[in-house]
Image (cartoon, helix red, strand yellow):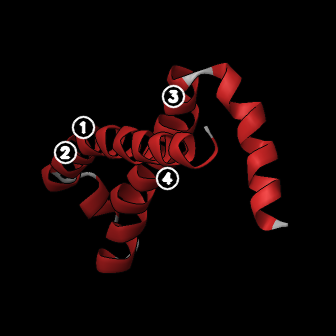
Amino acid sequence: MFEERNKKIWEKVRPKGMKSYLIQNGLLTQGLTFFIALGFISPLVNHGFSAYYFQSEAFRNRLIFIGIVAPVYGVFIAYSSWKSLEKKFG
């Protein structure tokens, strides 16, 4: 039942193509979630809500680094997922 549901979803996603899947699932879902979690939530947990930290150079450098890593991570995860789904249902 779960497998059948996943196959129906894949049949709707696949015709849109890998590029669309990488953008939607990779950049917008995985990458953006990763960016928000590591860029903003993690510093809040570690430093509390400190206006000083959010104005610091360390925070800006963190956002630049995560802004580069997060999209790459998201696309990599989406590409791996695409290949796995292609192999499973393709």
For label 3, the crowd category at 10 Å Cα-Cα, with few meaning under 14, some 14 to 19 and many 20 or more, is some
* Precedes in sequence: disc 1 or disc 3: 3
Residue density around tag 1, few if under 14, some if 14–19, many if 20 or more, within 10 Å? few
Task: Return the mark for residue 65.
Answer: 2
Q: Which mark is residue 33?
A: 4
Give the distance between the C-alpha atoms of the residues marked 2 and 3, in whole angstroms. Answer: 20 Å
- Which label was assigned to residue 68? 1
Work out which quarter of the rendered image holds the C terminus and state it: top right
**Identity of the residue drawn at 41% across and 39% down:** 79
Q: Amino acid at mark 3?
A: Ile
Q: Earlier in the sequence, mark 1 or mark 4?
A: 4
Instruction: Answer left or right for 84 relative to 10.
Output: left
Kind of residue at disc 2: Phe
- Report the amino acid beneath label 1: Ile
Q: Nearer the viewer, residue 28 or 87?
A: 87
CB atoms at circles 1 and 4 under 8 Å apart?
no
Q: Nearer the viewer, residue 17 or 31?
A: 17
Query: Does label 4 or label 3 sit earlier along the sequence?
Result: 3
Callouts 1 and 2 close, C-beta under 8 Å: yes
> How many angstroms separate mark 1 from mark 4 (CA)?
14 Å
Q: Residue at x 25, y 44 (%)?
A: 69
User: Quadrant of the rendered structure where residue 42 is?
Assistant: bottom left
Taking depth in this image into account, of 35 and 84 the one nearest to the observer is: 84
Label 2 environment density (alpha carbons within 10 Å; few <14, some 14–19, many ≥20): few
- Please state if 84 lies on the left or on the right of 14 as rendered: left
Q: CA distance from mark 4 to mark 3?
A: 13 Å
Amino acid type shown at disc 4: Thr
Of badges 2 and 3, nearer the viewer stands 3
Is disc 1 placed on a helix, strand or loop?
A: helix
Per the model, the C-alpha gap separating discs 2 and 4 is: 15 Å
Q: Which residue is mark 3?
A: 23
The alpha-carbon separation of the residues under discs 1 and 3 comes to 15 Å
